[in-house]
Image (cartoon, rainbow, N blue to C red):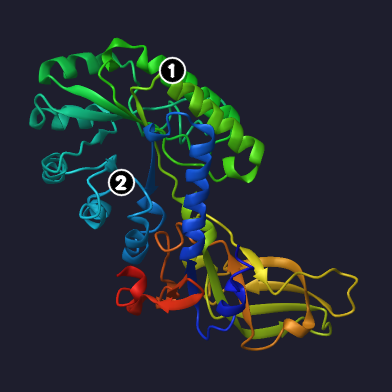
Amino acid sequence: KLRDNSFFEKIIKLKEPSIVYNLDFIKFIIDFIREDISNYVENKSNIKLFYSCKANTNLEILTFLNPLVDGFDVASKYEYQKVKEFKNNISFTSPYIEVETIQEIYSTNNIFDFNSISQLQQFAPYLINKEIGLRINVDLEDSNKTIFGEKSRFGINFNDRRLVEIIKIHALKIKKIHIHTGEKNTSISRNLVKLIEEIISNELYDQLEIIDIGGGFFNIYKKKEDTETFWCMINDFSNHHPELDLIIEPGNLILALSGYLVGSVGDISFIEGNNKIANLTLNVSRHNIFTWNKPNLIFPPKTVENNTNAVLCNIHGSTCYELDFFVNNIFLDKNYLKINSNFIFGPVGAYSKANSKHLHDYPFPKEYYFIEGDIVERVKIFSDFYFS
């Protein structure tokens, strides 16, 4: 897909530090997910595809995604404000919330998924006779026990005895449960379905209508057999519970592969007396941009040690931080080692901007969008016909 539309051939010509989001590829991924739902799930209308906003909240991306997804997942009032005008289907959970935001959420016929017993106790008096959601704490095999488990601060034990009293006193209805397990595999997904079955067998959840199983689908989609296994499990569950809607909220899967960073070489320093080992410094910082991931070098291509032109390279970012590097001990052909020559790294479409830093006041790279074969600047894209 990317080769066919000459994406890399065009972005390599950019003259400044840049991140380019391939909107064509975002649509391709969403269409691919929709096709899987259509192929594997009989009650396909029960599966709702949401976008997890924490991956990237650029207004252009949200605008592009709006007609392609069924709703948005948010975790702060700031994300909520950005998407509330797009759709009335919003999945919202957060360890911190204010009463004004709770009231606004409910005024738009959405609900909040409470993260803890104490949070629910705090806000339940404002929600007499209302529907609520609960984020459920999960402790599954193969999952990270600190982030997702008894030691995690996220989520409520689904059979916590205090729930019964709070629900009864305030006449609340549990309409939705919200579960995050991190990156899924087939084993985690299987255990997740078992947990959900256990939850819905509890009479406290007899008015349940919606189950949000979070994101974490990137690894599931690396292997076709894992993808098929996952959706077959979802199909079996949906057939047994046709009354329940199931939300998936991929952010990384939808966006990660769309984005690529372009930076250029600002300095080449060969090790004294050895023109086969070099330190390269780029005009962009990995430390400032990538907290959760280490992007791959896409261009120039790696070479092998026995290539007569091979140079062992360490590729560094532009800050004074010693550990600011993109990759170490990689062989490149010396013909690519020129001042101002461009390098491409990726994928960087998800979480890069949200986690970016500004050491030495370096700005975030200039952002572009690639759509229908053209590169469009952020400042121009809303006046373009693509969003008309």
Question: Mark 2 falls on what kind of element?
Answer: loop
For discs 2 and 1, the disc positioned in front in the rendered view? 1
Query: Relative to 302, is 158 on the left or the right?
Result: left
Q: Is residue 169 visible?
A: yes
Question: Mark 1 falls on what kind of element?
Answer: helix
- Give me the disc on residue 343: none
Q: Which residue shows up at 49% across the image and 64% down it? A: 24
Dot 1 amino acid type: His
Which residue corresponds to mark 2?
75
Q: CA distance from mark 2 to mark 1?
A: 31 Å
Query: Relative to 12, is 380 on the left or the right?
Result: left
Query: Relative to 212, is 27 on the left or the right?
Result: right
The image quadrant that residue 49 belongs to is top left
Observer-nearest of 301 and 41: 41
Which residue corresponds to mark 1?
240
Residue 153 in picture, x, y percent from top left: 36, 33
Question: In the displayed structure, would residue 344 be above or below residue 26?
Answer: below
Query: Relative to 79, is 257 on the left or the right?
Result: right
